[in-house]
Image (cartoon, rainbow, N blue to C red):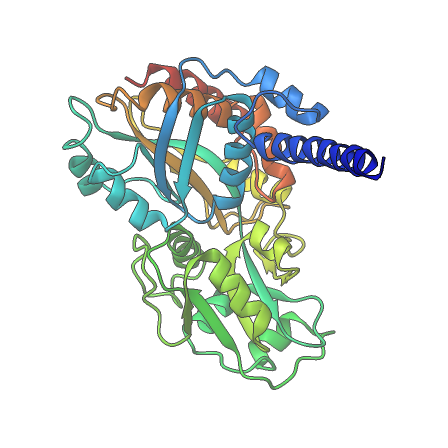
Amino acid sequence: MKLQRKNRLRATALGALAVSGALVLTACGSDDNTESTTSGDKTAAASSIKCDDAKGQVLAAGSSAQKNAMDLWVKNFQQACAGVEINYQPIGSGGGITKFTQGQVAFAGSDSALKPEEVTASEEVCKGGKGINLPMVGGPVAIGFNVPGVDSLVLDAQTLAKIFDSKIKKWDDKAIADLNPDAKLPSTAIQAFHRSDESGTTQNLNKYLKAAAPAEWNYDDSSKSWEAKGGQAASGSSGVASSVKDTEGAIGYFELSYATASNLTTVKVDTGAGAPVEATTENASKAIAAAKVKGTGNDMALELDYATKAEGAYPIILVTYEIACDKGNKAETLPSVKAFLNYTVSDEGQKVLSEAGYAPLPTEIAAKVREIVPTLS
């Protein structure tokens, strides 16, 4: 009897373990690549994203500015489209373009449009075609700071240029004090951080300072590399944001999503408008909406107005492009690239941007990109 009872107990325990193991395996099996899900949001995403013939792995690389947006897009896309992996490496715009022109990735992300020599280089891998710029992500380049006792800070282009060029070295400098008469500014040394890697974020800050403070900023505004004197370097937007958070007296530049994630206060910019402008997605959208298309054909390179004084328009902005071949894409990755980019530029894909601290593309620009993506070949 005792033996039978032990056997029954053992069988019950094994049964419980089997059920438990099945639940664990089910949970592990329900990864981001599966179509079935119990979440209402995930089901909605899966039903509205068109996978078409997408399959296999797609390698992509570039801008770290769009990393947080790309993470959301990849998660949603892979939940909807089983058997597809979008592997995006946020190595910086310069690195992404290099990988693209060397044929190592299917598309690249860049915070600045291709230069003429980069277009020429792309013709080697885009057989019968060339690399084109497809705007996909908009947003403000926030200036985050870490000054104990200072919860609000206003700076203008001239003062920012002098800070990042090591010409203003203390937080209680008269130029800063004049812009912030009610702030209790300490005599703490300014620790200005910039990107160590080639970055379209750096280039867009360069363009803003060159356009809005030409007398104070004497550096090449087409360069993705940091050329100003002094300061400290950190890798990627996440590295700069982390350094600012960890360093008393620090200031640095990065996309708004990184400021939000690091709980950093950002500078309001005095543009000459009626009131200083805060770095928000709405205020960035006001500036991006005034952009003009300077590319030709299917190339959607934009010309931004960094010196805008429009009310409520935040001037330090960037637009991140996905760079792909208009013709000559690799047959094995083309269906997945088209399906993925069709999703990112869709209403649904653009809608998730504001939740992550980015600005959706202006309606007219998004509509043009939606026409171009299906023509990639």
Residue sitting nearer the eye, 318 or 288 = 318
State left or right for residue 52 relative to residue 222.
right
Q: Quadrant of the N terminus?
A: top right
Residue 132 appears left or right of 283? left
The percent position of residue 88, horizontal first and vertical second, equals 41, 40
Disc tally is 0
Which residue does the image show at 15% across and 21% down from the upper left? 128
Q: Which of these two is toward me, 162 or 47?
A: 47
- Rendered residue at 60%/57% (across/down): 259
Residue 294 visible in the picture: no
The structure residue drawn at horizontal position 67% and vertical position 71%, both measured from the top left corner, is 180
Please indicate, yes or no, whether residue 330 appears anywhere in the rendered image.
yes
**332 sits to left or right of 358:** left
Is 323 situated above or below 188? above
Left or right side of 377 for 134: right
Find residue 183 and report its image quarter: bottom right
Furthest residue to the bottom? 187
Figure quadrant of residue 292: top left
Image position, residue 377 (x, y; %): 28, 17
Closer to the camera in the image, 99 or 84: 84
Residue 167 higher or lower than 72, as above or below: below
- Asked if 219 appears above or below 131 in the picture, the reply is below
The x, y position of residue 238, in whole percent, is 50, 58
Q: Residue furthest right?
A: 1
**Corner quadrant of residue 36:** top right
Q: Name the residue at the front extreme.
A: 1
